[in-house]
Every structure is written in C-alpha cells, then in structure tokens.
Amino acid sequence: RYGIVGLAGATAVSASVNCLLLYTVLHRRGWFHFTAKLAGRIARQLVAVAAMAALLLYMMPLMQPFYGGNAFERIWSLAILVAAGGMVFFAAAFATGALDKDLLAMLTRRRRNSAVTTKE
C-alpha cells in the first residue's frame, strides 16, 4: 500500500524504537545519563537537519522536470539533491557546533597516521 515510502518509514520507526530501547536499558543500568550538553548537541543537529530540509524542499520542484526523463537525468537529478543536501547539512552542523571539531580532528589525524604506517 505504501510502496517504497513504507520501507523507508518502517526503517525509521525501527531505528527510533531501537534507540529508545537502548537508552532505556543503559539508563536503568546507570551507564548513560541524558545531560544538558547532549540536549544542546541534539538541538544543534536538528537545526542542521532543518536547514537541509529547507534546501531540499526548495530544490525538489526545480528538479522535477528531470524526474520523468531517461535514466541518466533521473540519476543526475537525485545525485544533485543528495550532494546539495549533504553539503548544507554538514556546513550547518559545522557552523552551529553540532559536529565535535576535536573528535573530527582526532579521526582525520588517526586516518592520516594509519595511511603513513601502511606506506612504510
């Protein structure tokens, strides 16, 4: 009845239920506590998601003439939407502080160090 949208919706619902169950178990065992810092990070991520959604809502009607075209036009229009959405999300997340810059630096440093090690 819902087609491919139903599959995406079921995936989103199951991931949300899984997250809620994991939080419940970890909280009951005393291993995780929801803090104000975490709430602020989530709020900043929601701002980045809203920026991405606004861009996609603006761009989707512009790309609509290509949705019914040949395979190349459909793939290209989808690729443009995905790339633009990703760029806006990460730019907004970086600007609002939703991304942990120290963790990002550590991950890129670790990747650079492992690349140097494998070359030796």
Image: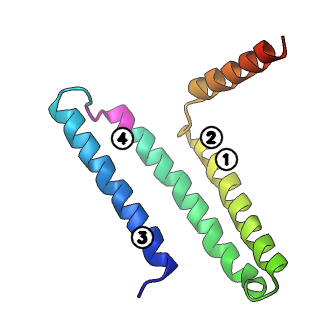
Where is residue 5 drawn, in percent x and y? 48, 77
Q: What residue sits right under mark 4 in the picture?
A: 39
Residue at image position (75%, 65%) is 79
- Which picture quadrant has residue 52? bottom right
Of the pair 24 and 50, the residue shown nearer to us = 24
- Mark 1 and mark 3: span between their CA atoms? 26 Å
Mark 4, Cα crowd under 10 Å, few <14 / some 14-19 / many 20+, is few
- Mark 2 and mark 4: span between their CA atoms? 17 Å
Q: Quadrant of the C terminus?
A: top right
Type of residue at label 2?
A: Phe
Q: What residue sits right under mark 2 in the picture?
A: 94
Sequence order check, earlier mark of 2 and 4: 4
Mark 1, Cα crowd under 10 Å, few <14 / some 14-19 / many 20+, is some
**Is there a contact, CB below 8 Å, between mark 2 and mark 1?**
yes
- SS class, disc 4: helix
Give left or right: position of 19 versus 114.
left
Highlighted range, magenta: 33-39
Where is residue 105 drawn, in percent x and y? 65, 24
